[in-house]
Amino acid sequence: MDLDINRCIMNFKQLGVQNIEQFLNNYAQKGIFMELEKGLISAEKFRDEVRKITANNASDEEIDAAWCSFLVDVPTEKLEMLYQLRKKFRVILLSNTNAIHFPYAAEKYLKHNGLTISDFFDKCYLSYEMKMAKPDIEIFNTLLLEENIDAANCLFLDDGIKNIEIANQLGIQTYHAKENESLSFLISDDTWC
Protein backbone atom coordinates (compact mmCIF):
# COMPACT_ATOMS: atom_id res chain seq x y z
CA MET A 1 0.00 0.00 0.00
CA ASP A 2 1.24 3.46 -0.85
CA LEU A 3 1.43 5.69 2.23
CA ASP A 4 1.64 9.45 2.85
CA ILE A 5 2.87 10.09 6.37
CA ASN A 6 3.27 13.82 5.76
CA ARG A 7 -0.39 14.20 4.81
CA CYS A 8 -1.40 12.26 7.92
CA ILE A 9 0.84 14.40 10.14
CA MET A 10 -0.58 17.59 8.63
CA ASN A 11 -4.16 16.40 9.19
CA PHE A 12 -3.49 15.50 12.82
CA LYS A 13 -1.83 18.88 13.37
CA GLN A 14 -4.98 20.52 11.99
CA LEU A 15 -6.89 18.63 14.68
CA GLY A 16 -4.53 20.08 17.28
CA VAL A 17 -2.05 17.22 17.80
CA GLN A 18 1.10 19.33 17.62
CA ASN A 19 3.59 16.60 18.60
CA ILE A 20 2.25 13.97 16.21
CA GLU A 21 5.71 13.18 14.77
CA GLN A 22 6.68 11.52 18.05
CA PHE A 23 3.98 8.89 17.41
CA LEU A 24 4.20 8.18 13.67
CA ASN A 25 6.62 6.96 11.05
CA ASN A 26 6.25 4.86 7.91
CA TYR A 27 7.29 1.58 9.54
CA ALA A 28 6.25 1.62 13.19
CA GLN A 29 3.98 3.67 15.40
CA LYS A 30 4.44 4.64 19.04
CA GLY A 31 2.21 5.31 22.03
CA ILE A 32 -1.53 5.08 21.46
CA PHE A 33 -0.96 4.53 17.74
CA MET A 34 1.05 1.34 18.40
CA GLU A 35 -1.42 0.28 21.07
CA LEU A 36 -4.14 0.52 18.40
CA GLU A 37 -1.95 -1.39 15.88
CA LYS A 38 -1.46 -4.18 18.43
CA GLY A 39 -5.13 -4.24 19.35
CA LEU A 40 -4.31 -3.30 22.94
CA ILE A 41 -6.89 -0.51 22.84
CA SER A 42 -10.15 -0.24 20.92
CA ALA A 43 -10.83 2.29 18.19
CA GLU A 44 -13.12 4.09 20.65
CA LYS A 45 -10.38 4.31 23.31
CA PHE A 46 -7.89 5.47 20.66
CA ARG A 47 -10.21 8.30 19.59
CA ASP A 48 -10.75 9.32 23.22
CA GLU A 49 -6.98 9.40 23.78
CA VAL A 50 -6.45 11.50 20.63
CA ARG A 51 -9.05 13.97 21.92
CA LYS A 52 -7.08 14.25 25.18
CA ILE A 53 -3.98 15.42 23.31
CA THR A 54 -5.74 17.78 20.88
CA ALA A 55 -6.57 21.40 21.35
CA ASN A 56 -10.18 20.76 20.33
CA ASN A 57 -12.91 18.16 20.69
CA ALA A 58 -12.48 16.38 17.35
CA SER A 59 -15.27 14.06 16.24
CA ASP A 60 -14.74 10.35 15.62
CA GLU A 61 -15.11 11.02 11.90
CA GLU A 62 -12.45 13.76 11.94
CA ILE A 63 -10.00 11.54 13.82
CA ASP A 64 -10.66 8.60 11.49
CA ALA A 65 -10.24 10.84 8.42
CA ALA A 66 -6.91 12.18 9.72
CA TRP A 67 -5.69 8.67 10.55
CA CYS A 68 -6.86 7.15 7.26
CA SER A 69 -5.19 9.95 5.29
CA PHE A 70 -1.99 7.94 5.91
CA LEU A 71 -3.30 5.44 3.33
CA VAL A 72 -3.04 6.51 -0.30
CA ASP A 73 -3.71 3.62 -2.65
CA VAL A 74 -2.91 0.10 -3.75
CA PRO A 75 -1.87 0.30 -7.41
CA THR A 76 -4.09 -1.75 -9.70
CA GLU A 77 -1.11 -3.62 -11.10
CA LYS A 78 -0.24 -4.89 -7.62
CA LEU A 79 -3.77 -6.18 -7.09
CA GLU A 80 -3.63 -7.91 -10.45
CA MET A 81 -0.24 -9.39 -9.52
CA LEU A 82 -1.62 -10.74 -6.23
CA TYR A 83 -4.53 -12.31 -8.06
CA GLN A 84 -2.16 -14.01 -10.52
CA LEU A 85 0.20 -15.19 -7.77
CA ARG A 86 -2.72 -16.74 -5.94
CA LYS A 87 -3.32 -19.04 -8.88
CA LYS A 88 0.07 -20.73 -8.18
CA PHE A 89 0.83 -20.05 -4.51
CA ARG A 90 -0.72 -19.48 -1.13
CA VAL A 91 -0.69 -15.70 -0.67
CA ILE A 92 -0.83 -14.36 2.86
CA LEU A 93 -1.04 -10.80 4.13
CA LEU A 94 0.93 -10.01 7.29
CA SER A 95 0.12 -6.43 8.14
CA ASN A 96 0.66 -3.96 10.90
CA THR A 97 -2.76 -2.39 10.77
CA ASN A 98 -5.62 -1.48 13.06
CA ALA A 99 -9.37 -1.54 13.52
CA ILE A 100 -9.73 1.82 11.76
CA HIS A 101 -7.32 1.40 8.83
CA PHE A 102 -8.06 -2.18 7.82
CA PRO A 103 -11.82 -1.96 7.16
CA TYR A 104 -11.26 1.36 5.38
CA ALA A 105 -8.46 -0.03 3.18
CA ALA A 106 -10.33 -3.26 2.42
CA GLU A 107 -13.35 -1.30 1.25
CA LYS A 108 -11.61 1.54 -0.56
CA TYR A 109 -8.37 0.10 -1.94
CA LEU A 110 -8.56 -3.70 -1.96
CA LYS A 111 -11.27 -4.03 -4.56
CA HIS A 112 -10.73 -4.34 -8.30
CA ASN A 113 -12.87 -5.57 -11.20
CA GLY A 114 -15.41 -7.13 -8.86
CA LEU A 115 -12.70 -8.78 -6.75
CA THR A 116 -12.31 -8.19 -3.02
CA ILE A 117 -9.60 -8.82 -0.46
CA SER A 118 -10.49 -12.52 -0.18
CA ASP A 119 -9.69 -12.88 -3.89
CA PHE A 120 -6.18 -11.47 -3.36
CA PHE A 121 -5.19 -13.26 -0.15
CA ASP A 122 -5.75 -16.76 1.19
CA LYS A 123 -5.49 -15.42 4.72
CA CYS A 124 -4.85 -12.10 6.44
CA TYR A 125 -2.77 -11.93 9.61
CA LEU A 126 -3.48 -8.54 11.14
CA SER A 127 -1.46 -7.06 13.97
CA TYR A 128 -4.47 -5.69 15.84
CA GLU A 129 -6.16 -9.10 15.83
CA MET A 130 -2.96 -10.95 16.75
CA LYS A 131 -2.07 -8.49 19.54
CA MET A 132 1.49 -8.22 18.19
CA ALA A 133 3.26 -6.31 15.44
CA LYS A 134 6.19 -6.46 13.06
CA PRO A 135 9.15 -6.39 13.58
CA ASP A 136 8.61 -8.45 16.75
CA ILE A 137 9.85 -11.99 16.08
CA GLU A 138 6.75 -13.35 17.82
CA ILE A 139 4.42 -12.32 14.96
CA PHE A 140 6.53 -14.20 12.39
CA ASN A 141 6.76 -17.31 14.58
CA THR A 142 3.00 -17.26 15.12
CA LEU A 143 2.31 -17.04 11.40
CA LEU A 144 4.72 -19.90 10.61
CA LEU A 145 3.15 -22.05 13.33
CA GLU A 146 -0.44 -21.33 12.31
CA GLU A 147 0.35 -21.89 8.64
CA ASN A 148 2.32 -25.05 9.51
CA ILE A 149 5.01 -24.08 7.03
CA ASP A 150 8.79 -24.19 7.02
CA ALA A 151 10.35 -20.70 6.98
CA ALA A 152 12.59 -21.66 4.04
CA ASN A 153 9.48 -22.24 1.91
CA CYS A 154 8.24 -18.67 2.38
CA LEU A 155 8.97 -15.49 0.47
CA PHE A 156 8.29 -12.38 2.53
CA LEU A 157 8.06 -8.98 0.85
CA ASP A 158 8.10 -5.83 2.94
CA ASP A 159 9.16 -2.21 2.66
CA GLY A 160 10.49 -2.09 6.23
CA ILE A 161 14.12 -3.14 6.56
CA LYS A 162 13.71 -4.14 10.23
CA ASN A 163 10.88 -6.48 9.25
CA ILE A 164 13.09 -8.00 6.55
CA GLU A 165 15.97 -8.48 9.00
CA ILE A 166 13.80 -10.34 11.53
CA ALA A 167 12.29 -12.57 8.84
CA ASN A 168 15.82 -13.36 7.60
CA GLN A 169 16.85 -14.39 11.12
CA LEU A 170 14.10 -17.02 11.00
CA GLY A 171 15.29 -18.37 7.66
CA ILE A 172 12.48 -16.84 5.63
CA GLN A 173 13.40 -15.80 2.11
CA THR A 174 12.86 -12.05 1.80
CA TYR A 175 12.66 -9.23 -0.68
CA HIS A 176 12.96 -5.61 0.40
CA ALA A 177 10.37 -3.80 -1.74
CA LYS A 178 11.20 -0.21 -2.62
CA GLU A 179 8.69 2.62 -2.81
CA ASN A 180 6.76 2.64 -6.11
CA GLU A 181 8.70 -0.42 -7.32
CA SER A 182 7.09 -2.66 -9.88
CA LEU A 183 6.97 -6.19 -8.56
CA SER A 184 5.90 -7.69 -11.87
CA PHE A 185 8.92 -9.98 -11.83
CA LEU A 186 7.00 -12.05 -9.26
CA ILE A 187 4.56 -13.28 -11.88
CA SER A 188 7.20 -14.02 -14.49
CA ASP A 189 7.62 -17.72 -15.24
CA ASP A 190 11.40 -17.16 -15.20
CA THR A 191 11.23 -16.15 -11.53
CA TRP A 192 10.14 -19.61 -10.42
CA CYS A 193 12.45 -21.77 -12.55
Image (spheres, rainbow, N blue to C red):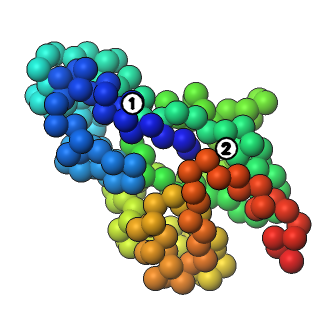
Q: Give the answer, above or below, for where 175 lies relative to 131.
A: below
Q: Secondary structure at mark 1?
A: helix
Mark in the foreground, 2 or 1: 1
Q: Locate the C terminus by quadrant.
A: bottom right
On the image, which quarter does residue 75 sit in?
A: top right
Query: With 53 as the anchor, is 142 left or right in this view?
Result: right
Determine if residue 155 is in view: yes
The residue depicted at 78 percent of the width and 61 percent of the height is 185
Residue 119 in sight in this render:
no
Amino acid type indicated by mark 1: Arg
Which residue is label 1 attached to? 7
Q: Earlier in the sequence, mark 2 or mark 1?
A: 1
Residue 192: percent from the left, percent from the top?
A: 82, 73
The amino acid sitting under disc 2 is Ser
Would residue 176 appear left or right of 37 to someone viewing this image? Answer: right
Asked whether the beta carbons under mark 2 and mark 1 sit within 8 Å of each other, the answer is no
* Few, some or many residues within 10 Å of mark 2 (<14, 14–19, 20+): few
Q: For numbered disc 2, what is the local secondary structure?
A: helix
The residue at the point 39 percent across, 54 percent down is 27
Circle 1 crowding by C-alpha within 10 Å: few under 14, some 14–19, many from 20: some
Separation (CA) of disc 2 from disc 1: 29 Å
Q: Which of the pair 75/58 is nearer the observer?
A: 75
Quadrant where the N terminus sits is: top right
The residue sitting at 54% across, 84% down in the picture is: 171
Q: Is residue 93 above or below residue 174?
A: above
Q: Is residue 94 above or below residue 79?
A: below
Q: Position of residue 129 (x, y in %)?
A: 40, 50
Left/right of residue 79 with respect to residue 133 in the rendered view = right
Q: Residue under label 2, please give it.
A: 118
Q: 14 or 58: nearer the eye?
A: 14
Q: Position of residue 5 (x, y in %)?
A: 39, 39
